[in-house]
Amino acid sequence: MSIDVNNESGTEVDEQAILDIARYALARMRIHPLSELSVIAVDADAMEQLHIQWMDLPGPTDVMSFPMDELRPPSKDDEEPPQGLLGDIVLCPEVATKQGAEAETQHTMDEELQLLTVHGVLHLLGYDHEEPDEKAEMFGLQAAIVDGWRAEKGHDGPSPAPTVS
């Protein structure tokens, strides 16, 4: 799995945790091990520009995903996953800090960025949360991945509440 994590936000973030949880999420979703992903952390001004340009919405957001090859998890256990470029995930630590503090189960910026990384990966894989059934599926999967990764890492406290982006 080739995953590049770049921090251009000016805020110190746990890049290794972002890399680790992205790798865990992709493995759990059975994405080909030679697939590629890019994760970048940007400041609020850069995120706002992307949010306006791509979503025509004002203000910065927490995470944006830009799929490339539109890879999907294999539908059957014995099916060979396709290889390709997953795309880019853009994170905003400033928004993550605020969301973590305001969440039902308060958590750190880094915990929020981990959750948002998984959220971004799922968007790259075609998951969405526009409809109630889609939201239930995506957020259930997101929680299972975050919980599984944290349990594996020895941090099995409560998961942050799902963030809607």
Image (cartoon, helix red, strand yellow):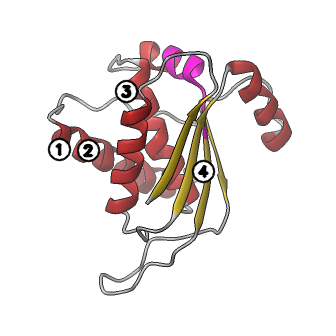
Q: CA distance from mark 1 to mark 3?
A: 15 Å
- Circle nearer the viewer, 4 or 2: 2
**Neighbour tally class for label 4: few under 14, some 14-19, many 20 plus, Cα within 10 Å:** few
**Neighbour tally class for label 2: few under 14, some 14-19, many 20 plus, Cα within 10 Å:** many
| Drawn side of residue 107 relative to residue 69, left or right | left
Say whether disc 4 or disc 3 marks the residue closer to the N-terminus.
3
User: For the residue labelled by badge 4, is the local secondary structure a helix, a strand or a loop?
Assistant: loop
Say whether disc 1 or disc 4 marks the residue closer to the N-terminus.
4
- Circle nearer the viewer, 4 or 3: 3
Residue 132 in view of the camera: no
What mark, if any, has residue 143 been given in the picture?
Answer: none
User: For the residue labelled by badge 1, is the local secondary structure a helix, a strand or a loop?
Assistant: helix
The residue at which mark 2 appears reads as 149
Q: CA distance from mark 2 to mark 3?
A: 12 Å
- Residue 102 location in percent, x, y? 45, 14
User: What type is the residue that disc 4 sits on?
Assistant: Glu
Q: Residue at x 17, y 44 (%)?
A: 152
Span highlighted in magenta in the image:
90-98
What mark, if any, has residue 130 been given in the picture?
Answer: 4
User: What type is the residue that disc 3 sits on?
Assistant: Glu
| Drawn side of residue 126 relative to residue 73, left or right | right
Q: Residue at x 44, y 71 (%)?
A: 73
What mark, if any, has residue 152 been given in the picture?
Answer: 1
Q: Confirm whether the magenta stretch covers residue 54.
A: no
Q: CA distance from mark 4 to mark 2?
A: 26 Å
Q: Are marks 1 and 2 in contact (CB under 8 Å)?
A: yes
- Residue 113 location in percent, x, y? 46, 30
The residue at which mark 3 appears reads as 111
